[in-house]
Image (cartoon, helix red, strand yellow):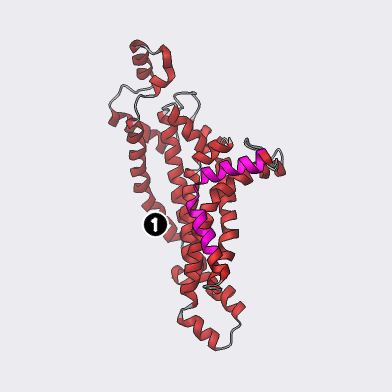
Amino acid sequence: MIQYVIKRLLISIPVLFGISIVAFFIVRLVPGDTVTAMLGNSYTPGQAEALRAKYGLDEPLIQQYILWLGNVIKGDFGYSQFTNTPVLQAILARLPITIELAILSVVIAVILAIPLGTIAALRRNSKFDYSASFFGMLGISIPNFWLGTLMILFLSLYAGWFPSGGFVGLYESVWGNLKSMILPAIALGTAVGAVAMRMTRSSMLEVTNQEYIKMARAKGVSSQRLIWKHAIKNALIPVVTVLGIQTGYLLGGSVVIEQIFGLPGVGQLALSAITNRDYALLQGTILFIASAFVIVNLIVDVIYGFLNPQIRY
């Protein structure tokens, strides 16, 4: 398993290299640049040229990329050209909020998806199965920003049960932190839970039709022991794949939800970098999220080994 992890890490290097190329060059396709955003209405060609020379933006793109990549390898993501703060420091300051949001979203998705998907498979073609499939399709179809807006309207403004926005740190108040995070976590985790529920149902249907399940049932193994000790582990392998991929998307796809609920996470930081055309900050954010995605997928592959002993061998 250790050799497998090392091999996967080595394979990730060219992937991250390719992402760094895309992140560096694609942000420069946005009209204007950092200097234009910084100067605003006081823009003059002389001031613009002076600032471009200061930040090295007047150099050829290839040279800029090589210099930036060399610094990234050393752990230096550069400085935000808009706020003049270290990019890595800005990302790490906001990363815990995005990670907490992603974890809560996945926890909500798992709590809903696995029991509902399993019961729907065991009661195939029943009213429960049809209802679960209906709500699963509904969860996939509803955009998370629209769901988040509705929850703010009804649960925050009308009912007053939750704050409509803002963030309370975990060290300030555990209950306050949970109240500020639960609505965005539900809005973000609903679609993930719906996808995982449908995958759990189809996977359980496939596993329960396998020969070893039929043989164990014929030998008199109780249905409860058969399902929860034998079938569920094999059925969870594709579900873990879906949850792993979705977790990676949650880390990078929380931009809209963080903006709606006023959460100062990495997603909101990336949106601010786009608005200000802050090249260094946006490049660092994209590369950081891509690295997190690679790490999450590696963790998923390791979990496979615990779920299925055949994979370990």
Between 16 and 40, the one nearer to me in the picture: 40
Image x and y of residue 242, in percent: 47, 58
Query: In the image, 240: left or right of 53?
Result: right
Snapshot quadrant of residue 262: top right
What residue sits 57% from the left and 59% below the top? 110
Residue at numbered disc 1? 7
Image x and y of residue 188, in percent: 54, 48
What residue sits 51% from the left and 81% below the top? 213
Determine the secondary structure under disc 1.
Answer: helix
| 43 relative to 177, above or below | above
Tell me the crowding category of disc 1: few under 14, some 14 to 19, or many 20 or more residues within 10 angstroms, Cα based. few
Image x and y of residue 8, in percent: 40, 55
Query: In the image, 270: left or right of 94?
Result: left
Identify which amino acid the numbered label 1 is placed on.
Lys
- Asked if residue 58 is among those painted magenta in the image, a careful observer would answer no
Q: Residue furthest bottom?
A: 219
What residue sits 58% from the left and 43% below the top? 150
Q: Main secondary structure of the magenta part?
A: helix
Between 19 and 118, the one nearer to me in the picture: 118
Query: In the image, 73: left or right of 299?
Result: left
- Asked if residue 154 is among those painted magenta in the image, a careful observer would answer yes
Residue 190 in sight from this viewpoint: yes
| 21 relative to 185, above or below | above
Magenta residues (range): 132-157
Image x and y of residue 160, in percent: 70, 40
